Image (cartoon, rainbow, N blue to C red):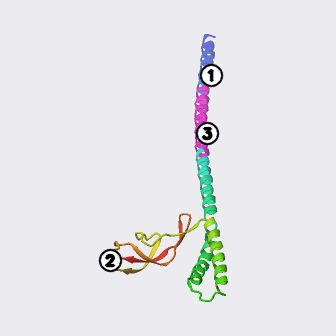
Amino acid sequence: MADEEKDTDTIIEEEQEQTSDEENVSEEQELTELEKVEQERDEVKEKLLRLQADFENFRRRVQKEKETDRKYKSQSLAEELIPVLDNFERALQTEVKEESAQGFVDGIKMVYNQLWSALEKEGVEEISAKGEPFDPHVHQAMMQVEEEGVESNTVTEVLQTGYKLHDRVIRPAMVKVNQ
């Protein structure tokens, strides 16, 4: 019977050890599962932060594009009307000798001024050129001349007026430049 008690005690101890081992294995599995869940949580959190940053960048980019579109909305209209301004200027340069035609010329001046005023309200302005240093961003050199008393690389004559819309050149000024 003593052997049976030893065997029973041994069996109980073995069962306790087995249960303890199973609990340790179970605890280790829980820890690894917990670590996996924490890792997944961290990954999801990182993805969320990146997604938020991407969305914020997208929102800023769209806002900037809207502002640019608003600022330059009248560019295509201005590009279409600039040749009309040129024709008005040419018409106004002709001399009228008859007094009866002077009323017609005055009417053309009024229409020209009204058109120019409307373009200015939209942000169109002439590019200053004569007497200015040559700037390839706003001037297009058509000829080079040699004039005494004028500094080198200076615009001496404007052949065609240039225009810009706010800070964007819509047509460069065509000019003669001193060598």
Which of the image's four quarters has the C terminus? bottom left
Comparing marks 1 and 3, which lies closer to the viewer? Answer: 3
Going by the numbered disc 2, the residue's amino acid type is: Glu
- Residue extending farthest to the front is 99
Residue wearing tag 2: 148
Q: Which of the marked residues, 3 or 2, is nearer the chain's N terminus?
A: 3
Q: Name the residue: 52% across, 73% down.
A: 162
Marks 1 & 3, CB-CB < 8 Å contact: no
- At label 2, counting other C-alpha atoms closer than 10 Å, the crowd grade (few under 14, some 14-19, many 20 or more) is few
Start-end of magenta stretch = 22-48
Going by the numbered disc 1, the residue's amino acid type is: Glu
Residue wearing tag 3: 41
Q: Which of the marked residues, 1 or 3, is nearer the chain's N terminus?
A: 1
Marks 2 & 1, CB-CB < 8 Å contact: no
Q: Identify the image quadrant of residue 104.
A: bottom right
88 or 7: nearer the viewer: 88
> SS class of the residue under badge 3?
helix
Could you tell whether 132 is left or right of 81 in the image? left
Residue 151 falls within the magenta-colored stretch:
no
Q: Position of residue 173 (x, y in %)?
A: 49, 74
Residue wearing tag 1: 15
Q: Main secondary structure of the magenta part?
A: helix
